[in-house]
Image (cartoon, helix red, strand yellow):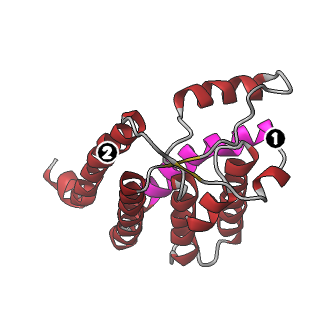
Amino acid sequence: MKAFIKKYSHAWIFSYFIIYLIWFFWLEQRQVSEYVIVESILDNKIPFCEVFIIPYFLWFLYLYFGVAYFFLKDRKEFYKLAAMMTIGLTICLIIYTVWPNMQVLRPEVMIRKNIFTNILGWLYRFDTPTNVCPSIHIYASLVIHAAVIKSKHFVNNKHIRYGSAILCICICASTVFLKQHSILDVVYA
């Protein structure tokens, strides 16, 4: 047991996510009298496409497996990833705290009825359209992809590097195709 604890002593960094989750959910629940609406003229040119719910939810696996891989495989690379993740997420939360923002891009009525729009309807009920700029979905995806690209473990593995790039791009695209984020949220992330 001592050897296990010593080998994974860097797990202390996960305690940050308790602070992050408390702060994030407080922001989601707080009552704000005025929000800044984040939008761009490009947002209306991007079509709504519910099938992007797939890469949108793949983000959770991408994040989990990316963090878990570096946690288990390479402490030094894990610390770099954790530093970038915690610094960026904290900056996002500070921005949301001092500059409450939201978007009004979501369709009022789903033009199609299918499993994807059903899942998206559930997401819309659960995830408020506030605290959107910069996008945490985008930022975290970019950090995971940067860790993969810079990792000595994947320098000769084109499949992992290209797969990560494709998934990262699909996740980023999903946020605007699902009308979860403005293109500005993507740029600022």
Q: Is residue 59 magenta?
A: yes
Task: Pick the residue in front: 48 or 17.
Answer: 48
Q: Quadrant of residue 95?
A: bottom left
Q: Tell me residue 180's x, y (percent).
A: 64, 44
Residue position marked by numbered label 2 in the rendering: 23
Dividing the picture into quarters, in which one does residue 58 lie? top right
In the rendered view, tell whether residue 17 sits above or below residue 85: above
| Percent x, y of residue 72 | 38, 58
Which residue is more in the foreground, 40 or 134?
A: 40
**Label 2–label 1 contact, CB within 8 A:** no
Report if residue 44 lies within the magenta region: no
The numbered dot on residue 107 is none
Query: Disc 2 versus disc 1: distance between alpha carbons?
Result: 31 Å
To which residue does mark 1 refer?
A: 49
Residue drawn at x 27%, y 57% is: 13
Q: Residue at image x 85%, y 54%?
A: 45
In magenta, the rendered stretch is 48-69
User: Of marks 2 and 1, which one's residue comes earlier in the chain?
Assistant: 2
Amino acid type shown at disc 1: Cys
Residue 178 figure quarter: top right
Classify mark 1: helix, strand or loop: loop
Check the picture and name the quadrant holding the C terminus: bottom right
* Disc 2, SS: helix
Q: Residue at x 26, y 47 (%)?
A: 19
- Name the magenta segment's main secondary structure: helix
Q: Nearer the viewer, residue 42 or 18?
A: 42
Neighbor class of circle 1 (other Cα within 10 Å; few <14, some 14-19, many 20+) is: some
Q: How many marks?
A: 2
Residue in the picture at 65% in, 59% down = 168
